[in-house]
Image (tube, rainbow, N blue to C red):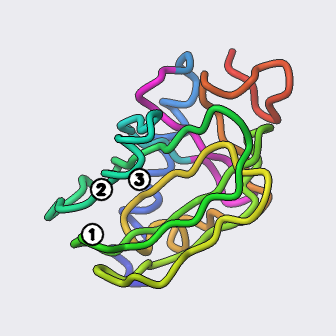
Amino acid sequence: MTCLGRALAGLFLLMAATAAQAACDDGQVDLRGPWGQARFSVEIADTEALRAQGLMHRERLARSAGMLFVYDAPTEPSFWMMNTLIPLDMIFVDPEGVVSRVHVNAIPHDRTPIPGGPNVLMVLEINGGLAEMFGISEGSEMRHPRLDQARAAWPCE
């Protein structure tokens, strides 16, 4: 990573740490781990139609933006990149808000299935390469109001 990349990542993490003190919001996802904290503004995909559309046909995604796929119950989702124009990282999250799998840099237009594994309640899609740059990995924790707050590893305040 370049010096500029490290500086931008550090600034983003600092802003996210400050923002993480705010209350949970449906349009925001907070992630934390030994690497620090990050916040993404998200669109929610919580219906079959919205999940099927996902981020297809988008030419760009703001750096601090993403899409949060929310399921009614834990499932074993599988994604692909058909009609998706930009590389994406997929962060699979269990019902407690713990990251169970990270798939980095999914290839645009690739039809190869990307399995999320069992017991997935949410999937966060962000720009390709960001998960690795920030250090988001298995065991990182997500905070979001759609998680059952009584079970959440990192509940809303």
Marks 2/1 in contact by CB < 8 Å: the verdict is: yes
Please tell me which residue is depicted at 71% across the width and 49% down the height of the picture.
75
Q: Amino acid at mark 1?
A: Thr
Judged left or right of residue 157, residue 132 is left
Marks 3/1 in contact by CB < 8 Å: the verdict is: no
Please tell me which residue is depicted at 35% across the width and 37% down the height of the picture.
43
Secondary element at image label 1? loop
Which x, y percent locates residue 31? 61, 45
User: Is 32 part of what is drawn in magenta?
Assistant: yes
Classify the position of the N terminus by image quarter: bottom left
Q: Amino acid at mark 3?
A: Leu
Task: From the image, tell me which residue sits under label 2.
Answer: 55
Which x, y percent locates residue 48? 44, 41
Marks 3/2 in contact by CB < 8 Å: the verdict is: no
Secondary element at image label 2? loop
Figure quadrant of residue 152: top right
Which x, y percent locates residue 154? 76, 32
Q: Which mark is residue 123?
A: none
Distance Cα–Cα, label 3 vs label 2: 26 Å
Read off the magenta span.
Answer: 25-37
Task: From the image, tell me which residue sits under label 3.
Answer: 11
Figure quadrant of residue 110: bottom left
Task: From the image, tell me which residue sits under label 1.
Answer: 84
Classify the position of the C terminus by image quarter: top right
Which callout, 3 or 1, points at the residue further toward the start of the chain? 3
Which x, y percent locates residue 40? 43, 43
Which callout, 2 or 1, points at the residue further toward the start of the chain? 2
